[in-house]
Image (tube, grey):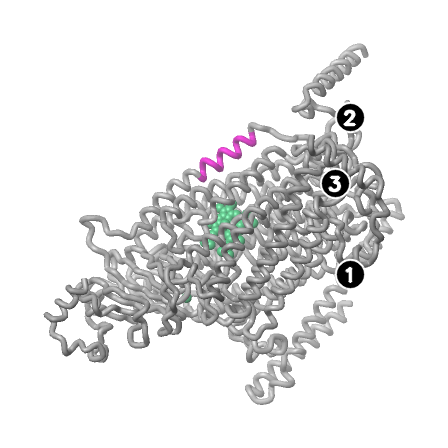
Amino acid sequence: MSTLAVHDHEVAHHGDDHGHHHKATFLNTYVFSQDHKMIAKQFLITGIIMAVIAMILSILFRIQLAYPDKAFPLMETLLGRFAPGGRLDSNFYLALVTIHGTIMVFFVLTAGLSGTFANLLIPLQLGVRDMASPFMNMLSYWLFLIASIVMLSSFMVQKGPASGGWTIYPPLSALPKAMPGSGMGMTLWLTSMVLFIASQLMGGINYVSTILNMRTKGMDLWKMPLTVWALFLTAVLGVLAFPVLVAGVVLLVFDRSFGTSFYLSDIVLNGSQVQPYEGGSPILFQHLFWFLGHPEVYIVIMPAMGISSEVMSVNSRKPIFGYHAMVYSLIGITVLSFIVWGHHMFVTGMNPFLGGVFMITTLIIAVPSAVKTFNWLATLWRGNIRFSAAMLFAIGMVSFFISGGLTGIFLGNATLDINLHDTYFVVAHFHLVMGSAAIFGMLAGVYHWFPKMYGRLMNEKLGYLHFWLTFIGAYLVFFPMHFMGLDGVPRRYYAFTEFESMKQWLSVNTFVTWAAIISALAQVAFLYNFFHSIFFGEKATQNPWEANTLEWTTPVERIHGNWPGEIPSVYRWPYDYSKPGAEEDFIPQTVPLSQTMSSNLPHDFEDNPAGLEAHAKWVNTQKSNEEVK
Amino acid sequence: MLSLLAAFVLLGTNVLMAQTDAASASPATDAAAADNGLPTAGYYILLFLIVCFIVAIVGKILKVYDLSQQVQGKKPMNWNNLMGALCLVFLVAAAYGAYWEFTVHGSMILPAAASEHGKKIDQMFWTTTTLTMIVFVITQILLFTFLFIYRYNAKRRGHFLPHNNTIEKVWTIIPAVVLTVLVIFGFFTWQQITNHIDAKGEPASINVDVTGHQFAWEIRYGGKDGRLGTTSYKLVNAGNKVGLDFKDKYSYDDLQADTIYLPVNKSVRFNIHSQDVIHSVYVPHFRVQLNAVPGLPTFFKFKPTVTTQEMRAKTDNPTFEYVLYCNKICGGAHYNMKKIVRVVPQAEYQAWLSQQKPYLTDQLKKDLKFAAESKGAEDKRLALNN
Ligand code: HEM
Ligand SMILES: [Cu+2]
Ligand SMILES: [Cu+2]
């Protein structure tokens, strides 16, 4: 009831002062905009820029891995002191790996993904004029932007950026003398992350409150598209988990700057400099980090799952299979993801009994993941599949999720993890299941909802090219890494030249690097397509994909407040595709059941006895009519 | 078009050749200005631009072709069919690729475990691999064949199937059961492996202290008494690398070693320490890994079962060595922090052990005024200390 009240107020409020409550200037339209659609675009473009930067970093360190003995004078020209003599410095190599990981996980796949699609889709798919708190929403973007700039600025400091890995385990990250990157670079990293988390919290609180309080009439929770469900649970996860990382980071700042020993104990530097720290525990940091870190990987993948579910349903012209199961498995993943973090710490010296417990919880979380996969396959079964570019990326997401998820079953088994931890097997696992799958989900979303952002369509054919090159490229890059890991090749090694046993992988590394370069170049097809289509793309129609959800009932012009008149009401779930008896193969959520008597099913009236009765009556009269004929 | 490309490729090779020539002709003298890699980079960039150009032209041709078809009243190109077919082609190619990977790269992985507990790990690994590969193959085949079979056809409609509780229960329960089995086996094996306390009646394990610091490992054996003396990080200095406490009489005969020698088929316990940042003791052939954490000693007990000699024969590699290396990012030289491990017959182990030098060198003894004190007095002092 309160939902309705709030909503009515919204309508009234917007109904009468629409159009005169602020003048549109360049500044408040494109820069300090409080319109959720503009903020979504700001997140997206910032995310894309950060992704390109992180991708270039990865190519730099891949070149080092492919040609560990070769000097590239150009490298020195570009990187100066970080590549003396044209060869990457080993500390700088670690800095590249660290910043690549940090940017990809947090700035691209967390902020870029959730920030874009939560902002764009929550109001549009739920029938809301804007976020609960547009100002806080704007702030969320600006904090994110500042965090990005601070993170990148660490390339400017004398000793280079943070370089302890994206997981920044102390004492390495706590002792400026332990490595160059643990000086100023780490300070900037920590600053950037605190700003970033503030941004995430503002965004997250906004998403949650908008979803819970502002849905349009008829949009009960079980009528929400899976995208919104996923974004909702993602936001909940973020709001609950990110503060723990702040705690971890703040204690680290104390250890670094104020002489405390939360994480430090029994330390001697350079073989003789005994440090005064006593009684701290480096393991404590790992607990705090992974308490966020594991939910974080689901923060990354769940929006991609939601987007893929939606895109696959639309383009298969079929309802998503097992909508309820899909939602319950998302909820299951959300809850379970808080009690599995220890699987990152099996061999850290954490009490082995604890390891055993975390193994149990970890393998349980594979069950909802499996259910989702099977449901996607069932959605495709007997569909009528349209291969839009978005659809291809959604399919790619499923393929990667399967390939990468299965290796999780190895790693989640503490016994097997003894020999796999911190090897390339882990690198292969998370790049497939998180890196590739989540990026593909994000790209699916961009291709699919581009019309809702820019009123135009992206070029489908170029999208196909982009898809196949990236899809094949990603497999070529990450598949061989499993075998390297099974040979005991460690991750985060600057070169594999110092060990006889690792030399057999040098040629594989060269191959992987070239596959990575080609996949990276394939992204030019996307960048060109994206930026070109913003200005010159084919004009979109109102509902180019013939989809059911509410965003396709808004005008192509993308006005402030989203709907020119009253906000539409919702009468049905979002997945009535190819319903037998219906005229078209899709029935938008705004079409009342009373207008679709011929296609209604008893199933549509599950929580509506009156409706069911009416339906039964209608069916009976139809039957008797037929008999009369 | 093509001739243009050919000419370009030729030009590029010339540039590259010139570069290699220049590089070989002037090893270190004047390479700086001329040979900064710009021509090569420029060549690759141009090559990429040409590829883009070709893509654009192909795109235009397709568009024109499509339009002309439409003008003639024929059907436009059916992209759905093409993509559906590509999915099938991908499936076949990827199946071959995966098969190739498993046979070629799959044969480059670690040999069977050279330790007792490692065999259990291997067994579990292969069970898990079999189960997951079955799922992998089935799901990927379904995914890509569905895409082909159910590709768009204007005459058809999708099959309206919102849910089916029976099948959903089936595919929730089956993975749950399989995973439960894996968890149970994993759990008990894990408990066995991580137990590092010698059981009553079991022969005592050989204790080896492994201490990591940037960027090397210090190895300490217990000496004649087989017991390791206590250490303290506060005592660490250039002369006392592991911070041995010489007030503890067990430390007098502690030996330092450059290589880790282990007798075959004897239980060994690594006592793992770190002095600065987190390191990780990783000996993949034994399936041994455990982090070295400052302030928190960790322990890994295992029993090597294959000598280095036997492994050399088995892997057909006369220079084969077991290697212990660091597997937790620890700084700039993390990639080169290793120790050789030799597994040898008992007799050879004893012979080697008797050659090792104690930590308590003559120099240290003098420094600590050991020589002056009589053994008896020392013992009394220790007793008082206790
Ligand atoms: C099927 C369920 C999954 C299981 C059982 C699982 C299990 C694991 C385990 C045990 C590790 C630790 C490996 C190690 O460091 O030794 C790990 C690492 C990782 N997983 Fe998963 N995982 C699953 C799915 C996912 C998903 C869905 C994502 C992300 C979307 C993900 C992202 C990661 C990342 C990023 C790491 C590496 C973190 C690092 O050390 O840098 N995993 N996974
Ligand atoms: Cu995890
Ligand atoms: Cu190390």
**Ligand 3 visible in quadrant:** bottom left
Labels 3 & 2 near each other (Cβ < 8 A): no
Q: Residue furthest right?
A: B71
User: Which quarter of the figure has residue B216?
Assistant: bottom left
The boundaries of the magenta stretch are B167-179
Looking at numbered disc 2 in the image, what kind of residue is underneath it?
A: Thr
Q: Please name which of the two marks, 3 or 2, marks the residue nearer to the observer.
A: 3
> Residue A355: which disc?
none
Looking at numbered disc 1 in the image, what kind of residue is underneath it?
A: Ala
- x, y (%) of residue A260? 44, 63
Return the residue nearer the eye: A629 or B249. Answer: B249
* Chain letter, disc 1 residue: B
**Mark 2 vs mark 1: same chain?**
no
Question: Vertical placement of B311 versus B3: above or below?
Answer: above
> Residue A128: which disc?
3
Q: Please name which of the two marks, 3 or 1, marks the residue nearer to the observer.
A: 3
Q: Mark 3 vs ligand 1: CB under 8 Å?
A: no
As for residue B340 lying within the magenta part, the answer is no
Q: CA distance from mark 3 to mark 2?
A: 26 Å
Q: Residue furthest left?
A: B376
The residue at the point 74 percent across, 47 percent down is A449
Return the residue nearer the eye: A507 or B249. Answer: B249
- The residue identified by callout 1 is B56
Q: Residue furthest top?
A: A628
- x, y (%) of residue A426? 49, 55
On the rendered image, what quadrant is the C terminus of chain B found in?
bottom left
* Classed neighbour count for the residue bearing mark 3: other residues with Cα under 10 Å, few (<14), some (14–19), many (≥20): many
The residue at the point 60 percent across, 86 percent down is B31
How many numbered marks, from 0 up?
Answer: 3
The residue at the point 11 percent across, 74 percent down is B374
- The residue identified by callout 2 is A596
